Image: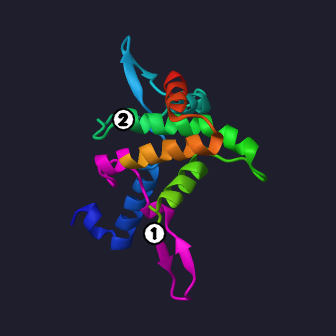
Amino acid sequence: MTPSAKQAPGVRRLRRRRQAVADDSPPLLFKRSLGSLRPANKAAEEALANLGDKPVRVRITSVGGNVRRNGLYWAVLGLVTPILSEMIEGDALTTSLLHRILKDRYGLVPVVTLPSGDKVKDYEAASTAFHRMSEPDRAEYVTWALATLSKWIGVDVQTLRREAEAA
């Protein structure tokens, strides 16, 4: 038997869920430069800054979806999060919380009814990752998200796009 055949089905399902959650975060994009990899977006810069001098393991994969659109979405979230945090009461927002809020508002988050009758939102099932959402659906979602964020902070979408692309 192969090692994966010995695992219980729940373990495989749990691993897939972890993968879906990991894919539903800002992409860490790098470009080859002078024989090494250099950060190509803000999320990658921040990840490297947080590493210090510790060695890391890297898995190089090609990307199957529209990376520019996905990068734009996360860059806009990074710009808008501190602005919205100043506008609300309570704890500051994070980009991942803002991402969850947008997915919920868009209607991507399914509600699960527990045996007790309680209802819980399953944010993990509402992934916008490349393998979970088609490109046309993701394009529609990102367009809606930018328009929504634009309305919330009072800045037009084109300005948001320009600022995010410059960041």
Quadrant of residue 149 within the rendered picture? top right
Q: Which residue is mark 1?
A: 110
Amino acid type, label 2: Val
Residue drawn at point x = 43 percent, y = 63 percent: 125
Left or right of 45: which side holds 8? left
As helix, strand or loop, the secondary structure at mark 2 comes to helix
The answer to which of marks 1 and 2 sits earlier in the sequence is 2
x%, y% of residue 46?
57, 31
Residue 82 seen: yes
- Point out the image quarter for the C terminus: top right
Label 2 CA crowd tier, 10 Å (few <14, some 14–19, many 20+): few
Quick one: 153 or 119, which is closer to the camera? 153
From this viewpoint, which residue is outermost toward the left? 1
Q: Position of residue 127 (x, y in %)?
A: 42, 56
Q: Which residue is mark 2?
A: 67
Q: Which contiguous range is marked in magenta?
A: 111-139
Name the quadrant containing residue 52. top right
**Residue 44 placed where, x, y %?**
50, 30
Residue for point 36% across, 14% down: 35
**Residue 65: where, in percent of width, then height?**
30, 40
| Mark 1: amino acid | Pro
The circle drawn on residue 141 is none
Is 138 part of what is drawn in magenta? yes
